[in-house]
Image (cartoon, helix red, strand yellow):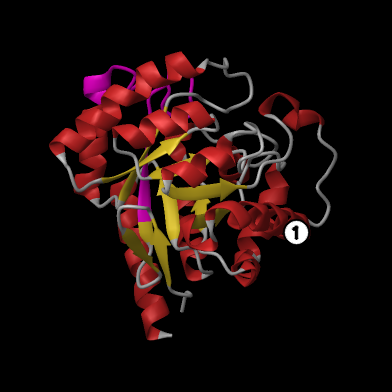
Amino acid sequence: MRKLFDWDLGTRKLELGPRTLLMGIVNVTPDSFSDGGLHLEPARAVEHALRLLDEGADVVDIGGESTRPGAVAVGADQELERILPVIEGVKRARPDAIVSVDTYKAGVARAAVEAGAEIVNDVSGGTWDAGMLDTLVQLRCGFVLMHMRGRPGNWRSLPPIGDAVGVVSRELAQRAEAAAGKIGRERIVLDPGFGFGKSFEENYPLVAHFETLGKLGYPLMAGVSRKSFIGRMLAGGGRDAPLGERLHGTLAVETALALKGAHIIRTHDVRASRDAVRAADAILEAA
């Protein structure tokens, strides 16, 4: 069974471990790799977030800037213009909903938490904005610390990672302990960052040995939904399966991750992922 944790979100604690939780993705962007432009209008984004909650999401993760290679960087003001109406709309409709903000900017994190978000999900693990950890000290919210190699623009030129499990474990441990020294361990969830600075084949050892990351002593989140390493595997021959044909492969990997100790699965397809992790949880309970 998974280790049990009470994730401190500041205003409340979220129990992690008895079952696999789902974080539904709400991209308020024109250029995200999977659903860019679909929910750019605030009302549509709020509607989508509420639908994900109805389908079984325990948390909705709202982001206003894509970090895929080639995406256009946006300033904090534009990012806030995109996400604040969505956060506020979700909280008006569902005051008890748990909202996460997907950002690496300290100023955006602050404004989002003040608007009702209870989790900051930072793809850089607090390394791209020197003020992020100090801001989190003041905000008293939950923090998802993700592992990232380099920046999206240089991913294709990065040298091979080598021992993916060893490198990610070591670097996550270093960054987590630095963050914990400021904000406390009970507020941190770790994410190995599937696809973020790892080549296609480098992601599979992280799946196969995901349970190793549990030895770091923190709860774990995994996000593999529709990612290119799954599309490349499904199509074969160096080609990528279209986004619309990656669901079944995604569910297989998500199930494996739940069985190997993931506390939270971050996904686009909440309804399908809900059924997959329920099956995984039943297997874990029987074991």
Q: Is residue 32 above or below residue 261?
A: above
- Tell whether position 33 is magenta: yes
Q: What stretch is highlighted in magenta?
A: 22-45
Location of mark 1 (residue): 170
Q: In this view, does 83 lie to the left or right of 65?
A: left
- Kindly tell me whether residue 226 is visible in this rendering: no
Q: Which residue lies furthest to the bottom in this view?
A: 287
Task: Identify the residue at image location x=36%, y=59%.
Answer: 21
- Kindly tell me whether residue 244 is visible in this rendering: yes
Quarter of the image with the C terminus is bottom left
Q: Residue furthest left?
A: 93
Q: Is residue 119 left or right of residue 172?
A: left
Indicate the amino acid at tag 1: Arg
- Tell whether position 133 is magenta: no
Q: In this view, does 82 lie above or below 18?
A: above
Classify 10 Å Cα crowding around label 1: few (below 14), some (14-19), many (20 and above). some
